[in-house]
Amino acid sequence: QIPVWLDCDPGHDDAFAILLAAYHPRIKLLGISTVFGNASLENTTHNAASLLTAIGKHNDIPLHIGQPKALERPALHAPTDIHGITGLDGTELLPKPECAPSPVPAVQAMAEALRAQPPGTAWLVATGALTNVGALLRAHPDMAEHLAGLSLMGGSVGGGFSDAPLGQVDGKDRIGNYTPYAEFNILVDPEAAAEIFANPALRRKTAIVPLDLSHQVLATEDVRNLLLLGKNGAAVNGNAAGGEGKTKLRQMLVELLYYFAQTYATTFGIAAGPPLHDPLAVALVLTGTPDEIPFPDWDAQKSAPPPHHERFEVTVVTEGSFEEAREGKKETGRTIVKLLPPGEEGVRIPRSVDTAKFWQVIEECMERADEA
Ligand code: BDR
Ligand code: CA
């Protein structure tokens, strides 16, 4: 099993990252830390505890509270028109948390848990702002060498990098989601992101899921039906919430997706379904294992055998305030990406993913969670 620490800000899509990390048989989830972002730190922590309870992992997976604000900026929270007021609006079925977050601060807990794994074996997955990861690396710089990998959801490439429908802003192709240029997680703490991408020890072992990739993985109505009813069209296991074999857990998670679908349709005009950004960062950890979820174009473009993936130099625009960025006056939080020649060390960025396989894996995790 691959040891993984998940740092997140739940968040509708973070909820599925937690499910995947907690129930994929090849992943050993060491712990979860929370960061502000989709809502206040208090809310994201409450949401994480509630989700752990919902999936029956509240006694197994330690939960630690991270940073309430960016390394060098005030806290920026997602507008409530995406994740709602709580950060996880849209269902009445979320249980009251049956676990309390640990008093050990996230950065300390991450360092201890990761260090307890043999060097070069553990992955850090980040699905929120990079503040906790940045603080970890400032306090424990040896972590960059110690980790097997860092996988994060964040950033955006644009310019035809993929066929993802990011839409348009003022008649021009959209690059960012929170601002015309910036993806939310990177914008929230651009200094942390810049430090991470500039770290020479991490360059080779970092993989990112940009919007160009995550916008290919839309939770369409068909996907929501699959997840609601299970692959045989009716979930089993007695745990029924009333109705055609839907379990309470499936119903809750699909209600979250339905809410997310509505906010994406209203805010971004994406009607087919909401992009499920965050679990892709967990899925990347499986690359190279027999359980990998293929990222086809990524490999197929190369004649050399895997792991000959495309690698990029990534820099982050840190100049500008949130207000200037929001108004489109500055490109604060923009990720600038340059393809490197084969053989050079750089960040791995997949261009596409086998979406059918991805949803199948998510469905299997739901099945395991139903049985738990
Ligand atoms: C990212 O921002 C949040 O809204 C999501 O949870 C995801 O991590 C997408 O830009
Ligand atoms: Ca997130």
Image: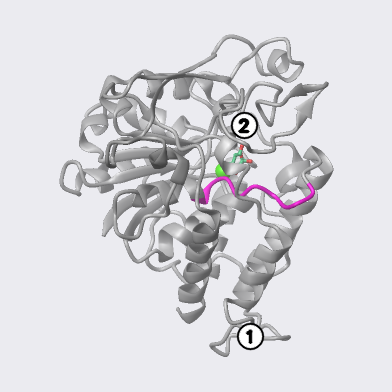
Residue type pointed to by label 1: Ala
- For ligand 1, tell me if the residue under mark 1 lies within 8 Å: no
Secondary element type, mark 1: loop
In percent of width and height, residue 38 lies at 63, 41
Q: Is residue 205 above or below residue 110?
A: above
Q: Which residue is mark 2?
A: 184
Q: Which residue is mark 1?
A: 240
Task: Determine the image quadrant of residue 355.
Answer: bottom right
Magenta region: which residues?
271-279
Residue furthest toward the bottom?
A: 238
Q: Is residue 200 above or below residue 155?
A: above
- For ligand 1, tell me if the residue under mark 2 lies within 8 Å: yes
In percent of width and height, residue 263 lies at 78, 47
In percent of width and height, residue 82 lies at 73, 43
Q: Residue at x 78, y 42 (%)?
A: 81
Q: State whether the magenta stretch is mostly helix, strand or loop.
A: loop
Q: Nearer the viewer, residue 239 or 47?
A: 239
Q: Count neighbours of disc 2 (C-alpha within 10 A) and say few if under 14, some if 14 to 19, many if 20 or more.
A: many
What scheme was used to colour the molecule? one colour
Q: Is residue 278 above or below residue 70?
A: below
Q: Residue at x 30, y 39 (%)?
A: 149
In percent of width and height, residue 22 lies at 42, 62
Residue type pointed to by label 2: Phe
Residue furthest toward the left?
A: 118
